[in-house]
Each structure stands twice: as structure tokens, then as C-alpha cells.
Image (spheres, coloured by chain):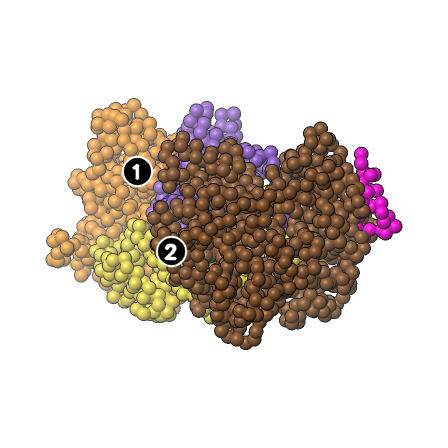
Amino acid sequence: MDKTSHPYIPTLLDQLNEGEISRRDFLRKSTLLGLSAGAAYAMAGIIDPATQARAGDLPKGGNLRIGMRCMEIKDPHLADFAEKSNVIRQVCEYLTFTDRNNITHPYLLEKWDVSDDLKTWTLHIRKDVKWRDGRALNADDVIWNLKRVSDPKVGSSVFGLFTGYLVEEYDTGEKDDKGNPKKSSRLWSDKAIEKVDDSTVRLNLFSPQIAVAEHLFHYPMFILDPKDNGAFGPSANGTGPFEMVEYTVGKGAKYKARTDYWGGAAHLDTFEFVDLGDNPGAGIAAMASKQVDGLSEADAVQINSMKAFPHVAVHKVETTQTIVMRMHPDVEQFKDKRVRQAMRHALDRDKIIQTVLLGAGTPAEDHHVAPSHPEYAALPKWPRDVEKAKKLMADAGHADGFELDLVTRPDPIWELNTTQAMAEQLKDIGIKANIKSLPSAQYWEVWTSAPFSLTAWGHRPLAIMTLGLAYRSNAAWNESHFSNAEFDKLLTQAEGILDPKERSKVMEKIELIMQDEGPIVQPFWRIFSTVMDKKVQGFELHPSQYIFAKDYAVASA
Amino acid sequence: MAIFVAKRLAMMMLTMVAASFLVFAVCEFTPGSVARKSLGPFATQEQVDFLTKKLKADDPLLVRYGRWAGVLLGIIPDPLQDPSTGLNFKDPRGAQYFGNFGYSTLNKLPVNDVIWSRLGNTAILAGLAFLLIVPLSIVFGILSGLKEGGVLDRLLSVICITFTSIPEFASGVFLVTLFVILWPVLPGTSPLDSEGGWSVPSQLVLPVAVLVIYDFGYVARMIRVSMIGVMEKPYIRTAVLKGMSTRQVVIGHALRNAMIAPFTVLLLQINFLISGVVVTELVFAYPGFGRLLLDASLFGDIATIEAATLITVAIAVTTQFVGDLGYMLLDPRIRLR
Amino acid sequence: MTMVAETISTNGERASETPLLAVQDLRIEFRGKAETIVAVPKLSFEVKPGESFGLVGESGCGKSTTAMAIMGYLGATGVVAGGSIRFEGEELVNAPAHKLRAIRGRRIAMVYQDPMSALNPVKTIGAQLAEVPMLHLGASRVEALDRAAAMLKDVRLPDAGDMLKRYPHQLSGGQQQRVVIAMALLGRPSLLLLDEPTTGLDVTVESAVIDLIGELRRRYGTSLLFISHNLGLIAESCDRVGIMYSGELVEEAPTRELFGRPRHPYTQGLIDCIPDIGQGKHSRTLAAIPGHIPLPSERPRGCLFGPRCAGFRAGLCDRPGMSLEPVGERHVVRCVRWPELEVARRELPPLSGESAAPAAAITVSDITKFYHLGYQKTLKANEAVSFEAGKAEIVALVGESGCGKSTLARIVTGLDRATSGEIRMAGENIAAIEASARPKPLLQSIQMVFQNPDSTLNPSHSAGFSIRRSLKKFGIRKGKAAIDQRMRELLEMVRLSPDFAARRPSQLSGGQKQRIAIARAFASDPSLIVADEPVSALDVSVQAAVVTLLLDIQKTRHATMLFISHDLALVRHVADKVVVMYLGKVMEKGTVEEIFGGATHPYTEALISAIRSTKPEGAERKRVTLTGDTPSPVDVPRGCRFASRCHRKLGSICDREPPPIRRMSATHEIACHIPVEALETPRHQDEARDRS
Amino acid sequence: MSALVEQRAMEATAVKATGRARLKWARILRSPTAMVGLFLVGFWVVAAILAPVLPLYSPTEQDVMALADPTPSAAHWLGVDILGRDELSRLIFGARTVLVVAPLSVAVAMIVGITLGMIAGCYGGWIDAVISRLSDIILAFPVLVLYVILIANIGPSIINIVIATTIASAPGIGRITRGLVLGLKEQEYIAAARLRAESTLYIMLVELLPNCRGMLIVDACLRIGYTIITIGILGFLGLGLPPPNPDWGGMVKESTTVLNVWPLMSVLPSIAIVSLVLGFNLLADGLREAWKP
């Protein structure tokens, strides 16, 4: 065992050996605390998938084409779709890497150290990383990036993650038009992000946070060359394995492998994204015609169509991607928590999974904590019980039900289908949800203001990440207007507890609050899937929908 | 003639002003502000408010329209490109030049960077379709109009009417099933590069076919009606009774007359094709103007919508103008009046 | 069957001379989806080499269909169901296409009605003419154009070289018809079919075209088959005439014989229907043939004319299988009672009554109407038109197309407003008040009978609708019952049974529609009726009846009437006073006697001279033939408007200065530079006969 | 009379003789084109009207068992859709939507267009100029672009589709009406009406409108067909009527992903659209033929 390793690691190992925590928990915790992934995997007695992928002799050369929407990519720190980040990801990289088992590894970092109180994170930057222009990556580069995403003027979604431990809200002293004090946000201290030396950066938190490493893998958290000043394009400088050769919005992206990549040159010579538009049929047609070698994503229905293609291999990964039907507890119809409970009882989750996902999902429990999350606490299941639900409705004074607009969006189609499936089941308890399907841009405009709506949530390795973003009172993405002081308190508490066993106890309380009076009905956790041509090797589907082309190879025909 | 051209140009300007204003007004209904769209969904409200003020996006509709027009005409610089916005939007052409369509909030690029290549792609698609529609519809129209109610007329009419009744998405679905899935001889999508193993021409076959199927029947019907009218005209009788054969009569006397009325209709198809390709482009993932327009409309990207509107209206008015000129060439009766 | 007899009777005399065209027992059917219409049941006639044969009949009698059958061009539904058409001994019925093509345009050529539409609007005259020699005579393009130019000279078109490059719309109607004639003659045909070649042309132009045809025929020795409804034209142009009625030939004879001694009651009736230029208003009533031509599906048994014939004898005239019977040298007639009927020819009673000079009912002074067509373009429809009409008087406005007579009618009725000038009616100036601004009593007092029977009634409403509406709007009667009662009376007045009120206009014949229109005009008890060419679109046999009816009602109602017409013969028959207009200006005005009497304006003289008469001796009248066409009203001559075409033009003064008004009498004025004395010199016409 | 006119008259008599006294509508019976069109339209209309009483599944009821094999079966004659809903029921209930929305939209567009066209044609002058210019401007927009911009901005709903159709179609209808009115205005019966002090409104409604009827009905049929296609396209673009109400275009969109395994899911609604549009187009064509003057 490493000398520099965190003092808590032996405890973890004991817990693992006694079966108190799972292998995965152990891996996650130990790596989080700075243990190298290789070592952690070795201690846990399983093979590191990263080394596994590299182990085989993958063929060299060739071109790989993946079908994916190619949207604007002006500012990587502002990327708001996984697709956008995929375009950038081949050129720019993260400090950390969370693998498909939700284990976070150092990446551009050599390693990190965490203080016992989880308030001081020391990031050791790899010394062998070179920008494409030949310059070595240094602490100033990293600090520039971290400070940039912490600037509210930039508008990165990382800002929301940093709020609460690096970023604080403050009163500007000015008044707005209505005379209310104007609030703004900033780094809590000049020392919040501190340069230790040329290759070491220290983060000083004002409150404990265990998910810092995961946050550094949040999709817009790219390390960019400060010289590019946040702009991205074919000429952008990056540390990544590829150089972007060409980019046309709505058409595609082309990359050329860097021979001087610090991590060893990619297997591929060139790599491409091909924009296939919003028509899900186009992806299938392109696969059928072998115009692309794979898709960045294919939903269960698309998979069902393509699994018969002889040249296609299906890839699946369990994720914490989900969709929630959320209610504003401050509107008339949902005021009474019994209505929300009734809605949770009205759902036949298996049926929805069978219908919408063709089975590719696992039932969720309305508290937005997935069984695959390390902090998950198992609770009794809520099977469908229409009678009970109806009674709850009647108790809440809605015996005859009510009618309300339910906001959703038309794409991706599984979201709309889920909406329809859920609305159909809610009919049985008298809730008539009139589906209002708004084009994406308009949907995002009313996203937080519509009283009754469906929202898809992306994969996050830790439940507290989502809970903090979405359900803490006044949180940045609190779309449900949920506000519960006890919940907030428990969540903050959980964020500072390292011991999974201990944290699970707090989590159980949180989950119960969510089930009792939470603002959401959550049907399932989605199994994420896609297709690749069988000639594609080294491909492993990442639950965050991330594409790492450097790991892939194509067998020549 | 000069007066005629001048009048038409004035009318074109007027139409473009009115059309762009109408679109501007319609876009008012879209929820969401330019500031929010420029900054992205995660920008703080504070930042959005700051930019809104900076862009004077709270000004009355007419003032904003005026400002947009000013940017377009190169009278004032594009406010979105002002460094003080912090948006870092930069048009290599500069912030102030004639024909500045502004910055696309959807693509975060100058509209001029995106729209022209898309238009070019669509022009290829529409152009090819047009090149097929013209002869096909003329042949169908003339043949069926030759003898109204005849067997050939009935047959061709049924084909034409049926084809015009098939929406593009339906024929797209049918064709993909047939030629991509069941009998894979053609590519299912058209990204317009040959690296997927299919040549670019092969990628054009299906989209062009879809457009032709939907459109040619309509034009053929127009030509048919015109042809029927012409064939009933006394001068056709004159020609026949001169001792000319049917072939001579059709080619020598009927064809040009029969094309006079449908000529405008035919040209209008350019207009229809340039923008009516939305569905086709979506089905075949064709990187064209129609899809851009659809995306921009859905996103509420006013700069792009306005640019697309002006371009389509300009094309429409220009084709009308060309139509009128062609009309004059075809019909000496209205020459230079 | 009588086929044999017929063949002999028409062919018997000069069997040795092979006819150029022999039509025998021709049966033409139109086979529609629903039923078959027999357009021509059985028709036989022939045209001999060098002969000019006229085929006369009213609309729907099958004369044009016959021509088309000869050309083998009956359209999609027309079929020659029986009989034969032999041309120079060759059978044309069911002839193969290539044979027909070799004949068409080469050996048989055709001249059509409405030359404008007969010419391809998008091809130059030269291209269209050159096609004929290129097609039939193997000429090269250059050669063909040379021939075309030569032929254009033959049809007296000036500047043939330039003409070849022009398009049809750049030519006037008369020039277009000359081009069509040239086109027909370019193939050097032995037979020329003329299908109403001058209908639609102005009378003065018609005259020139007919003269040209006669001359060319003599020059080229071409046989003619001349089809027309105009008896006068036929009488003057043909050697032999066949009268057709409802698809049958009812009488055939050499021209002089036929018009001199018509044997068939229909022929007689047709002749009597036509107002004779030689006879004035009060000489005789126009004889109208009662009823209307039967539809092909409603043909009666036996004599087709039976139901309309005064000499109809049941049991005799309704026996089937009537044949053409010889009645004289080369004269055959299809009537079983011809010997008796000839004796019993009607003598037509003279019209009674003279009207005294009445008080003025309407005074038109200096009415000018300009339409501004655009930049410095003004259409001068009327300029300084003045006249007046007395109470119960009939004033005729006469002139060719574009003379502004209809514009004036519209101004009087308020459908348009004058640019300047006054129209006084009951003391008020109504020239600038449009109908919508006119008070109801004024609208009520001026009503109009329109020209086109097909557009005079709203096809969506019943025939009685507008009469009822008029009665109601003007409060002539109150209450539904009273209105219906009055409407029935009005229908009776126009000699229609009351059940016509419920019929749709599409179920009425042209004459019936015009009757309804007359009833509608009189429904409001107007004091002034403006009749704009009320009968020009009707068949001659119907025309007479409608005119007679109109005059009767006008007379009994004491209504003043502005009668607008291009037909001088009719005007002479109808009017008390005549105003002759040309290009928006009044050329001459006076009483009907003065206009048709001694001194007249050269234009009036030309108009009168252009009228063709069936009277054989009429052919000997010396004609005034005008050159050229009426100039465009947008671009009027500076001096006398008529100067460019005048046959009595004095010199440049006519081009320079507007003519002075020559007062010939208190009522007679002529606008002309020719001095009074010169105007009074007797004209070429035999005036003695006029005054009889 | 010219030969051609005479001949035409003869032919017309041959065609029409028996129908002279009968209603214009009766002529449709003799046009096979119109009859086929009428049958297709009638089929959907009857199906749509009877939908609630027919023994059909609910169009939104999801049968998860049927999804195992969504192809036609004894339980679901035409199979089920991607969410296990009965295809037949969705097709028939989908007809209800489209047969309400399309004719309603066209009716509103007709009312607006005819009114504008009548006013422009009757009054002429600057009123005509203003209306015509405005029409030109809207007509210069490609129709689909107009729909997409409008619907994307004001959102998909029946009312908004009606509004969009009205804006897109009214100028065209107005132009046709104006043309007809300009032709009819010079007819003598209009002059006669003016001479008996009829108001302009009366002339428009009683004297002019009935004579435009034929052309306008034909035009309406074509426009209904086109509007059905447009509604389908909007559905396909995801701008259609909101789910779960069956919408033919939306049904195609939903099932394009399963085209190669369960082609019926997209082919059936496509056929439904094509058949209904074809019905209206044939009807229009047949009517035009039957009512040819």
C-alpha cells in the first residue's frame, strides 16, 4: 500500500473484506481518496477495464465514422449537450476520468490528495502532457480553466456544481428595479484555487465535498488552452489524442490522430462524426447502408430494429440516466402531498419499461437515487396500487381527478413515449394530463417554470450530485421548486460523510422524504445502448454517452 | 423595360421588408430572449439581464426591427459582436458590413458562415430535382393533354394525382424500405461525403426521387390543363387542317403555347424546392438549407430565420421576375407592354 | 327510302360534269358518354368545279359541322356515321390519316371565323404561312417565305416583307383575315371552305374581305363552299345556295332563283326576317318565325320545320321520310305543300302610326369620356357627344366597334361616369353620377337591355329572380303575391308562359333570355330604355321576333329608347333618329329619313353601302370600299377622325383640322370638311327605290 | 356560328343533355374519378363518424403483451404501434382529427380568402392594390416555411394550425376569388343588379358568390388535401397535434425507427394519408371535369 494513501483506505478495505460494502463501493471510495485505479482494482481483485481495453492488440490505422448530431461548439465550457462535448472531447481532455463502473481515475492528473475533512484537494498534474503546439500542460493552464468555469459571466454548468463549496452567493449591495438586493456569485476566497507549484494546484473548499473528482469530469469541464480564450474550432489547441481538421455545424466533424499524443497515439488514423439530423430513422438507414460505423446513441427501439443487421454489434451499459415527471408543489393540484403519493402509486413501472424501453431499464423508486449509486439505500418497493392511489386522491380532495397541461418535448422520442405511457396510467386515477410537446428550445425556456413537466436527467456517478443540483432549495436546476429544510440539511450532511455505511443511513432518510413528499414520479433507470459495426474494436459504451475515439480501432475488412 | 425592371425591384424590396418584418413579429411569440439564447441555458439570470440591457432587447418591436435592418444594411455594427457583451462572437467579415445577417444564436456562428453552404447543398438537390421535374412533367402533361379523356390521359392522370398525394415523408419511408433495407442498392442517408463508401451521386438519388415524386405530378397536371386548353384552340385546328401531322402540330404549334401558362408554375417549383426540402432533408439527413431553417425555427434563432426568409423571398421574387421575363419571351403578345 | 330520288334530283341534270365535292347521305353523330346526338341526319349536296356554293342556316343547323366532316376533323366525339364525302372522286370518310393530310391545306383549304384565334399567337405570320408550301409543295424555307410574301401581296396586304415578321396580335382583324386567306390559298387548293369568314368583322371591313374573296376566286379558279348565316353575303357571293335547317337541306337552288322565288316556308321566313336597308321603319313589320330551332334530340317527325310553320298540316307534314323534290331547274325543296304555300305567301302589313315631334326626354351634351391607361396614354372613348331624345322616341346610336356607343350607354345608365359634359334628364345632370350614387327613382327611370343573352341573366338564379328583385327593390308591387302576379304579367308581355320564371337560364334559348331581360328592364316602369345591341347575338329568325317585341312594348309604354346597334338595316327599321359615331365622335345625326336619304357623311355612306341584300338587284349597287381599319381609340387622328379611311377625303385639311359641323337641316348635322353642296350631290345608290 | 363553337355545343349537349334539369351535384355520379375520390373520402368520413360506436380498442390504451409481436393478429387486426396501441383504432381515430382540422382550417381560410378576394375584386383601386400586395408578400413565402415558422413559434394546436392554414392559404384563395370576380364583374347581370340599386354586399353574396362556387369548391378540395399533407408533415416534424391523440404524421414519425422490422407501423398511416389526400384530389379533379362549363 502506498504511503501517501489516504488514512481511510484501510477501513474501506476491511469493509470490503467483510462484505459490508461492495467491490464497486470500495473501488470508488479508494480511488476517490487518491488511490490509483490500478491499485484499487488490484486490491479489489478485479481487472482494471482501462488496462483490459489496452491489453488486446488492437489494429492500427483506418477511419471510424460515428453518427451524431453536430451542433455549435463555440465554447467548450458552455457545452450543454453530451453530443457537443463529444466533439470537443477528442481534442481537449479532463483532469479526471470516471469509467463505466463509476470509478473515477486521475487523467490529466497524476493523482490527487484529499484532506481528512474533505476540504482540501491537491491536484497533481501530469508532467508529460503536451499541448498540440508542443507546450507542456502546467498549473496555470488548469487554474485558468477552473477559474473560468467559476465565473458566473461565462455561464458554464460546472458553475452550478461548484456552488456550495467553491462558489458562494453574495449580496452585491446594489438594488434591482424592485428594490430587492441584487445577489451575485463568486469564488468564496482568493485562495479557493491555489497554485502550489508548476504542476500542483490546490482547491480550498469552504465546505466538505466528496464529489470533486467526479465534478472535474463533468462534461464541460475541459482543460482548454488559455490562449484560445474559451473558443473552440478546428484550430483549437488541445492536449487530446486528435486534432480537429474540419467542422461543419449540422454536417460533421473530422479528426486526425496526433502522433505525439502523451498517452500514446490513437489506434485510428482518422475519426469522424457524421450529423444524421433529428430523424431517428436516419441513423438506422445510415447503419444499414454502412455509411457510419456506429452511432453515439441508439434507443431500445432503434436497437430492436438494428439487432438483426448481421454487421452490427449492440452495446449496452447500465446508467443512472432517468426521466422524472415533476410537479410544482406550489400549484393548486399538487399542493397536497397525497396527490404526489397517489401518482407514485398509480405507476406500473414494469409495464412502462416493457413498452417504452422494450425492457431496457430498471424500475426507479421516485427518489432519484439509483441502485448503482454508491450511496443507495434499499427501501420497500411501491408496486402499482390504483385503489390506494384513488383513495389518496380522494383524501386530498381530488376524488374526481383534475386536468392539467404536461410539458414535454418531442425529441428524443423515448421521452415523449414515456410521457405518453405515464399519462395513460395516470388516467386511471383521474388525472388527465394534456401533453404539450414543445420544441427543445422552447422547452428549455419553460423548463423550470411549467408546473407539470417531464425532464430527463443524465447519468451521474453519485446520487448526491443530482440531488444537490435538482432538489436542494433554490438550487440552480431546481426545476420542481422543491424546498425542504430537512432534506437540505441531510443532503449537506451526506456530502460530507465519507463512510458509505454512514452515508447510506442519511441517504435512507433523504430517500424517504422524497418518497413521502418529494416532487417527482420516476419510472425507471435507463439502460443506455448503442450500436457499432462489428469491425469496431475496443469500443466500450460509457454511461455518460461519452465517446473516446482514442480507445477504438477498426479491423480492416 | 427599365421601368418594368425598376418596378419589380422596388416590389421585391417592399416584399422583403414586409416579409422580414412579419417574421420578426411572429418570432415575438416564441418564448425566450436573444440574450438567453446567446448565453446558453446555464447562464445566470444576472448575466442574461446584463446582456439584455446591453443588446437593448427590451426596446419596442419596431426599434429592434430597425436595428436588425441597420445591421443587415451595414449601417450599424452587430451588437452581438460588441466585445463588451463578453460573448466573444466574431465575424471574420467584421461587425459592420452590407449583408450582415448577424450572429446565429443556434450555431453561435455568423449566419453568413453557415447559410450559404447549406443553400448550396440544397441548390444541388433542388436543381437536380428541377432538372428532372421539368422534362418529366412536360412529357406527362403534354401526352395526357393531347387527348383529354383518352386512355393515355386517364392513365397518366391517375399516376400524377396519386404521386402528388404522397407526402415526402411517406415516399421517403417507402423508398428507404425498398432500396436501403430490402434491396440495399442505395445509401439511406446523404451526408454528402463519399467516405461512407457511397458516392455522392448515389446519395442524391433517393432525396431527388422523393422530391420529384411529390412535385412532378402537380406540374404535369398544370401543363395538362394548359395543353387541353391549347388543343381546343382554333389555331391548332388551323395547323391540323393545313395538313400537318399530330407530331408536327404538337411540336410546332401546341408546345410553346401550352408552356406559357405553366411556365410560371414551373418556375415557382424552384421556390418550392429550395425550401420545401425540409422533410426530405430530415429523412435523409441531408445537410441542407431546409434542415437549417427547421432547426432555426425550432430554436427561435431569429437571425437565421430572417436570413432564410430573405433568401427564400428573394428567390421567390426573382423566380417570379424571371417567370415574367420568360412569359414575355414565350408570348409575343405581352412583350414590352 | 328516298335516297335514290334525291341523288337523281340533285345530280340529274349535268351528270356528265363530275362534281369536285360530292356529299351524299352524310350522317354525323356526336357520341357523348350519356347519349348520342345526331348533328346531321342525312345530307347530300355537291360543289362543282369553279362553282361557289353557299350553305346557309342558323346556329346549330349543322352547316359548320358538315364543313368539319369534309376536313375530317370532328373532334374526339364526332363520327361520320354514314354516307360518303367524295372529293375529286376520292372518298374522304374514313380515309387514312396520311391521305387526309395530303388533301388538307393542299387541295382543300379553309378560312375560319375569328381570324385572331385561327392564327397561332406565338408564331410570326411568315412562319405560319411558310409552313404550307414547305409541307405540301416541298419548298425550302426561303422559297416558302418568298411565296408567302407574294401571296400577301395578292391579298393586298401592304409591306409584305415586314408583315412576315409580325405576330398576329400586331395586325388588325381585317389584316388577320387576309393572312388566313393567304394561308389557305398558298397550297393552291381546288376547293376553299369559308366558314363564316367575316362574322365578327366590322361591316366596312367585311365588305373589303368579301370583295377580295370574289376577286381571288376569279383569279385562281378555286371552288368555294361558303358557309354563313348571312343571307345577304351568300346572295352576293354564291352561284348556288343550299338552305339548312336542323341538319337537313330544306331547299337548294341557284342563287337568283332561290332568293327570287323561295319555295320553302323557312327560306321565305328567313328572308322576311331581315330588315331591308331599302325599307324604312314604317314600311312593314319584321316577320318573325315563331318558336325556335329544335335541339338535335328533339327533332319532330316529318318536316323538321313543321312546328314553326304557318302552313303546317297535320297528317301531311308530320309523315316521316320527306324528300327533296324538284321544283324547277336545279331547284329542289323539302316541303310537301310547296305548291299550295307559294300561292299563299304572306303580305306583310305596314306599321301604323307616325310620332309627332315630342318634348325632349334626355339631352346629352358634350359628353366626353377618357380612360387613362397609364403614362400619357388615354383612351378617348367619347368626345363631345351631343344629341337629344324626345319622349317615346327611339334614337339609334350607330357605329362600328370602338366608336364609343356602348360607353355612352354605360354613362347614361350610370354604370360609368362621364369625364365631362352633361346628361340632363328631368332637369337633373346625371352624367357624373354613378349608379350606386343615384337616387332610386332615377335608377328606376333608366333601365337597360344588354347585348349578350348568355351573360344577361345570372346562371345561379332562376329566370324570374331578377324581375322579382327589381319589382321589390323599386317597390313597384308590395307583397310576394302581388310581385309574383306582376312578374307573370311581365312574362306574358314578352310572350313567355309564367312557368319560365322558375327555369334556370341554362334551360333557356338565347331569344328567351333576351325576352326575360326585356321584361326585367320594363319591370320598373322606366321612362328610358337603353338597348345595347339587344339582338346582335341572336339568330336572324329570332332577332326579328325580339325586335318586334321590344318595339311593341316601347310603344305601349311610351318609353324613350336609346337603341345601340351596328346594323344599319335594323336601325333604319327601328329608329326615329340616328346618331352615327366613329371613334368616339359623332359624325352625323338626323332623323332616320335624313340619314338614309340624300346627303350623308362619307362614313355613313360607307356603312350603308356595305350592307348586303338578298335582293338580286342589290348586287349591282356600286360599293364604297373603305381601306384599312379603324385606328385605335388610344391613338386617334388629329383632324377628322375618319380621315385616314375616308374615300372622299379632301386633302391634308382633313388630317389637320377637326371638321366643322354642317347643318343640313334643323335636325340633320354632319361633321365634315366637305362643303354642304358637295355632300348633297346624289350618291351612287338608287334613291328612288328607297322612297317607295 | 363558328364550327368549333357549334361542335363544342354539340358535344356539350351530348354530355349534358340528360343532366340539364338536374342538380350540378348529380353530375359527379357520372365521373368515375369523382366517384373514386368520393368513395375514399367517404370511407374515412364514415369511419371517423362511427369510430366511437365501432368495436375498437381505445386509441391510447397500451397493450404491453401485444408488443411482443406487434404485427397483425386476431386481437389487433392491423397490429399495434410502438407503444402497444391498436393500430386500426389509431388510424380511425386519427381520421377524426385530420377530418376535423383540415376542413375546418380550409373553411376558415376560405372565409377569409373569399372575403378579401371579393373586396379586392369588387372595389378595385387602392383597396385591391393593398390586398393584392399583401397577398403577394405572403405568397412569396414558401408555404411549408410559413407553417414551420408559425407553428414552431406559436406552438402546435388545432387553433394554431387553423391560423397557420389561414395565413398560408387565404391569399391564394383570395387571388382565385379576385380573378373570378374580375371576370364576373363585367357580366351584364351584375350591371343589371347595379341598375336596380342593389348594394355591393348583396352583389357580392347573391350575384357573384354563387357563380364562384364551383371553382371554389374544387379549390377547397385540393386545399383540404394539401392541408392534410401539411398536418402530416408537421406531425412528422414533431410539430403536430399533441400526443397521445393519434396523428397520422406523428404515427409515421414514431415508427420510422422500426421501419425495417415492423414496416406496417409506418406504412399504414402513410397509406391512410395518401388515400385520403388522393380522395380529395380525385374529388377535386372529378368535380372540375363534371362542372366544366
Residue with the most extreme right position: C16
Q: Write the residue at 85% across / 47% down.
A: C13
Instruction: Write down which chain is painted purple.
Output: D
Residue labelled with disc 1: A405
How far across and how far down the image is residue C298, in percent? Answer: 64, 34
Q: Which chain is brown?
A: C
Is residue D174 visible in the rendered image? The answer is no
Residue at the spot of label 2: C424
Residue drawn where x is 45% and y is 48% of the image: C392
Q: C243 or B163: nearer the eye? A: C243
Does residue C501 sit above or below D143 in this rendering? above
Q: Magenta segment, which residues? A: C1-23
Residue type (three-letter) at the residue carrying disc 2: Arg
Relative to residue C541, is residue B38 depicted above or below?
below
Q: Residue at x 34, y 69 (%)?
A: B74
Q: Which chain is yellow?
A: B
> Is C620 on the left or on the right of A151, as rendered?
right
Task: Give whichever of C294, D135 is nearer the camera.
Answer: C294
Under tag 2, what secondary structure? Answer: strand
Distance in Å between CA atoms under marks 1 and 2: 73 Å
- Of residues B150 and A196, the one drawn nearer to the viewer in this rendering: B150
Residue type highlighted by circle 1: Asp
What color was chain A assigned in the picture?
orange
Relative to C618, residue C167 above or below = below
Establish if C173 lies above or below D170. below
Pinpoint residue D143: horizontal percent, then vertical percent: 44, 51
Q: Residues within 10 Å of mark 1 (few under 14, many from 20)?
A: some
